[in-house]
Amino acid sequence: MHYLVLAMIIAVSVIDQLTASHILPKPCQFIPEALSALTVLYVVSVGSRQRFRNVRTAYWFAFGAILLVMLCGAIANDVAPGPIFAGIRYYMRAIPIFFLPAVYDFKDWQIRQQLRLLLLVGLIQFPFAWHQRLLVIRTDRFSGDSVIGTLLDSSVLSIYLICAVCVLTGLFLRQRVSALTYFVLFFYLLAATTINETKGTLILLPIGLLTVVLVGAARGRRLRSFMLTIALFVVFLVGFIPIYDYMERNNPYYTGIEQFFTSEKKVDQYLDTHAGVGAQREAGRIDAILVPLKRLSNDPVQLAFGLGIGNATHSSLGPQFIGAYFPLYSGFLVSSFSDFLLETGLFGTTLVFVLYWLIFRDSLTVARSDDSLTGWIAIGWAGVTALIVVATPYKAMHVYESLSFLFWYFSGLIAARRMRLAFAARQEQPLQPAVQTILAAAPARYQRGVARN
């Protein structure tokens, strides 16, 4: 299973770019799904024998409730088989990876190899991004949207790298990475975010870093670590702003970072474009939530269960897999939150955030009670989970395998670790033998009998 995870990391991080560049044949883009199918076979066969003892009951309730919501939404809206299949592919393909660590106990050396491979993936992003930025300049274009590294989207590239920095920070707080190595990797990994025009970096990065520090810093050094993190972010900001301004110097539609965040008009244009149902242009982040919510409110069943999985989204599999409501809501599918709301309603969206909460709580527990490699990862993963919560209304992350597969794998690793720690703690508790209990209780009963007589 270790080699399957290594193959999965390569597949979700590189293969999409290779198929998009026609270096590999297009069917290779389904390799992550094939690996997920293999994972299902292994998880079911081994997990059933183990009775899934390393999966918390809360997760079964959460996943079961989500499946029930999806079923109700599909039945209530009479969704065609094609969109249902496409919806299952997007929503469920990464979930088997979550259960893999529960049935296979990965050793520290295996997890270390996986982290090194992920670090290598992170390190190659800047050369790719720099080459792509040079192509933008040479072709007299201005947008950084095509500066994507190997991850198919500029925002996904930034989120991926910020997550890597969060895990790196957790290792640094446990003194598993030297200060020099940490600072060099910190600025190198984030270098690609300065040239891909992703303003969300300036919101997501401090949220992830500060969460990691609050979780992982020693109690007596928490304030010092907090101030150091603020200073580190300020240094990054000092570099980010002039680089961003320089890259956009010839853009006739250029808006500076300071102007964007301080101008109420600019922020309003980004969040609220006043788009209506059926609009073809991309709606603002607030529009993408409020407009579908208002439309779904006309039908209590659709408000609760949504329009049905796959029934509002596009699919690359063919016309028969495209949702019936996609032409109506195509401009609003700008984030995972809007997708969840449209296709699973309030119930499904709420349950997704319940899952995030369970993962965050498991990360806290493991980070505070485990001094193994997984415990160190859990420190950073608390920051990653907080970042994912904030990014859910920002980007449609669930459709990108590089984010969804890796998020669910490491979340499963930490959730399973919590259960193993709990079982180990129970086994260490001294149990009084039943015979001693009987012998200790017998004289008391005898004395009570004698007293009554």
Image: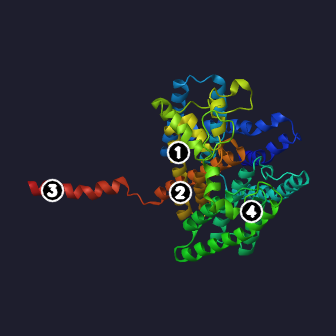
Helix, strand or loop at label 4? It is helix
- Judged left or right of residue 342, residue 202 is right
- Disc 1, disc 2: CB below 8 Å? no
Distance between mark 4 and mark 1 Cα atoms: 39 Å
Above or below 342: residue 418: below
Q: Residues within 10 Å of mark 3 (few under 14, many from 20)?
A: few
- Compare marks 1 and 2 and give the one earlier in the sequence: 1
Name the secondary structure under disc 2.
helix
Disc 3 versus disc 4: distance between alpha carbons?
75 Å
- Image coordinates for residue 258, horizontal then vertical, percent: 68, 64
What amino acid is labelled 3 in the image?
Arg
Q: Earlier in the sequence, mark 4 or mark 2?
A: 4
Q: Which disc number belongs to residue 421?
A: 2
Foreground disc of the pair 4, 2:
4
Q: Say which residue label 3 marks.
A: 448
Instruction: Please give the name of the residue rendered at 60% of the width and 60% of the height, measured from the top-left corner.
Output: 383
Q: Residue 190 bears which disc, if any?
A: 4
Q: Which is more N-terminal, label 1 or label 4? A: 1
Q: Nearer the viewer, mark 1 or mark 3?
A: 1
Alpha carbons under labels 1 and 2: distance apart: 12 Å
Mark 1: amino acid: Arg
Is residue 438 placed above or below 89 in the rendered structure?
Answer: below
Q: Split into 4 quadrants, where in the image is the N terminus?
A: top right
Circle 1 residues within 10 Å: few <14, some 14–19, many ≥20: some
Residue denoted by label 1 = 53
Q: Are marks 3 and 4 in contact (CB under 8 Å)?
A: no
Q: Residue at x 77, y 50 (%)?
A: 145
**In what element is the residue under mark 3?**
helix
